[in-house]
């Protein structure tokens, strides 16, 4: 039996090779892998002894050779293939262990295009694909995590077609993801990220029990190990809908850096938000906005949930609590509640990804775009359009309202008072309806909007939203501006003594 080992990621490769050697495999290897194996006492054969041809063109060609690919690809169940292999002096290769040049690490480290080109693997993907195609005769190993299971399987004599098939699928995933990464990089470099093909590649983290509904299948996939590194399940199982709600809640709660922020989400929409000196106070204030909707909701805590906060949260039914950390004492408080789900996301503070692109499924395809980012300077540099100027506290409320509005379904209007959201209208077909709906809900909850700051993620097309806000006692408004009736909106703000700011940036979320 013969194994070919040629890896860029050399974690565990020596132990794997030793395990194969004990099982009677002859080891063929290349370049740096060969040197490491020889230094470790493994009787490896250098590749050019098999190819009968030296590595050439500075290593660009070393495994693209019929003695290699013939050894991998010829079928063992066809006598004509066996006869031809014998005639040509091609010796069978029964196991291929290959992973590819570190293209991702290279583009993260340098912008030198020549170096980047040299870190595009050619021979590696060819060997992986050859072995995967002939998986019934050849074991293909591309993941160091599979080294131990493969050795154990071979030692036990349970080498099955099912195992080989699983490794084959993983191998094609490996090369497909690699080529996708290269194509996407080239399009980012030369076509502003929008080439003729767009590849979205994720790695499965876990299956969900089902999708949005019980008749649908679902799973979570991640980019760059984001969930594997940052998401920890403490209690319960995250559903498909939980994950989408968690994403929305965490984006809002974490949008304020190290502030003690708490966001409550129900069905993808924020129904409570507050920033306070303590997380307990922040949660208490956030809950006041809409305690009815908060029942069975998702709470994102930008910090550590301790026993005292847990006891307060435990007063109502919450389906999901996600925080930077949840102490063991807090977990004990929640232990008796069977239906609650607890997750940690980050370390002390909530963690959010920095995805460069965003996409959404549409019937028959998907739309793809640069990711939207809400920046602090949008409020800091906003242009005052009114005669009245907002106080420092009101400017803080404007910033909170602006960020929450930008991260909430359009059409959206958000009212914030003293660091807490007191009303929100979202997902409406009319912006004035969003404003009025929010105020009506606040009235039902007994919340005083007088003195609040209001944000709209897009411009007001008419002055009617400003008039409604003034009637409710709003003292400051922030919006992008850009309507043909901006002058009317500014005039309305001055009539009512409202401080009005334009950011010049729109944040639709559809």
Image (cartoon, rainbow, N blue to C red):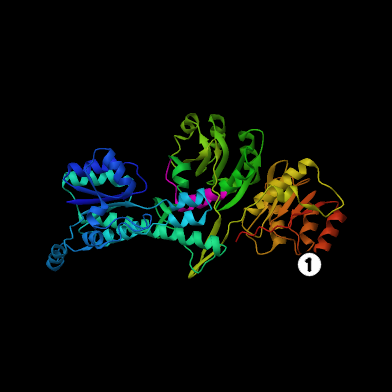
Q: Is the residue 359 above or below the residue 222 in the image? A: below
- Left or right of 457, for residue 90: left
Whether the magenta-drawn stretch holds residue 297 is answered as: no
Which residue is located at x 75 percent, y 61 percent?
Answer: 460
- Left or right of 278, for residue 316: left
Q: Quadrant of residue 303?
A: top right
Label 1 crowd (10 A; few <14 / some 14-19 / many >=20): few
Mark 1 lies on a secondary structure that is loop
Q: Magenta stretch? A: 235-248
Relative depth, front residue between 295 and 93: 93
Q: Is residue 383 in view from this perspective?
A: yes
Which residue is located at x 25 percent, y 61 percent?
Answer: 69
Residue 243 image position (x, y, % from top left) = 49, 50
Q: Quadrant of residue 219?
A: bottom left
Residue 51 image position (x, y, % from top left) = 24, 57
Residue 363 image position (x, y, % from top left) = 49, 69
Residue 296 image position (x, y, % from top left) = 52, 46
Identify the residue under disc 1.
484
């Amino acid at each position: 039996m013969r194994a070919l080992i040629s890896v860029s990621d050399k974690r565990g490769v020596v132990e794997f090779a030793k395990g194969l050697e004990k099982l009677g495999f002859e080891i063929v290897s290349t370049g740096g892998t060969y040197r490491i194996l020889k230094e470790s006492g493994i009787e490896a054969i250098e590749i050019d002894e098999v190819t009968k041809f030296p590595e050439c063109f500075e290593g660009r060609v070393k495994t693209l050779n019929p003695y290699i690919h013939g050894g991998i690809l010829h079928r063992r169940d066809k006598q004509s293939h066996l006869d031809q292999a014998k005639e040509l002096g091609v010796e069978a290769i029964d196991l291929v262990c290959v992973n590819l040049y570190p293209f991702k690490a290279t583009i993260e480290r340098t912008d030198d295009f020549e170096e980047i080109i040299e870190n595009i693997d050619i021979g590696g993907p060819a060997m992986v694909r050859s072995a995967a195609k002939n998986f019934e005769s050849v074991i293909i190993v591309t993941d160091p995590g599979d080294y131990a299971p493969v050795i154990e399987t071979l030692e036990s004599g349970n080498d099955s077609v099912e195992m080989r098939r699983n490794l084959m699928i993983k191998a094609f995933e490996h090369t497909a993801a690699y080529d996708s990464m290269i194509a996407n990089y080239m399009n980012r470099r030369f076509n502003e990220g929008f080439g003729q093909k767009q590849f979205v590649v994720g790695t499965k983290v876990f299956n969900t029990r089902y999708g949005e509904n019980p008749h649908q299948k679902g799973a979570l996939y991640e980019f760059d190990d984001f969930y594997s590194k940052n998401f920890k399940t403490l209690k319960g199982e995250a559903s498909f809908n939980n994950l989408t709600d968690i994403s929305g809640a965490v984006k809002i709660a974490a949008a304020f850096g190290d502030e003690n922020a708490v966001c409550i989400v129900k069905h993808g929409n924020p129904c409570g938000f507050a920033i306070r000196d303590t997380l307990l106070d922040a949660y208490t204030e956030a809950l006041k906005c809409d305690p009815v909707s908060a029942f069975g909701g998702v709470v994102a805590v930008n910090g550590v949930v301790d026993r005292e906060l847990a006891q307060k949260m435990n007063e109502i039914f919450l389906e999901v609590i996600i925080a930077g950390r949840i102490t063991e004492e807090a977990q004990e408080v929640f232990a008796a509640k069977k239906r609650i789900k607890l997750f940690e996301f980050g370390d002390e503070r909530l963690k959010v990804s920095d995805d460069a692109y965003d996409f959404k499924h549409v019937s028959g395809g998907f739309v793809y775009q640069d990711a939207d980012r809400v920046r602090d300077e949008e409020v800091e540099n906003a242009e005052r359009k009114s005669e009245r100027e907002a106080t420092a506290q009101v400017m803080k409320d404007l910033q909170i309202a602006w960020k929450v509005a930008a991260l909430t379904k359009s059409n959206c209007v958000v009212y914030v008072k003293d660091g807490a959201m007191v009303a929100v209208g979202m997902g409406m077909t009319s912006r004035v309806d969003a404003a009025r709906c929010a105020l009506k809900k606040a009235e039902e909850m007994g919340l005083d909007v007088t003195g609040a700051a209001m944000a709209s993620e897009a411009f007001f097309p008419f002055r009617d939203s400003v008039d409604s806000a003034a009637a409710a006692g709003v003292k400051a408004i922030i919006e992008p501006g850009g309507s043909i009736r901006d002058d009317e909106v500014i005039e309305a703000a001055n009539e009512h003594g409202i401080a009005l700011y334009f950011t010049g940036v729109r944040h639709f979320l559809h």
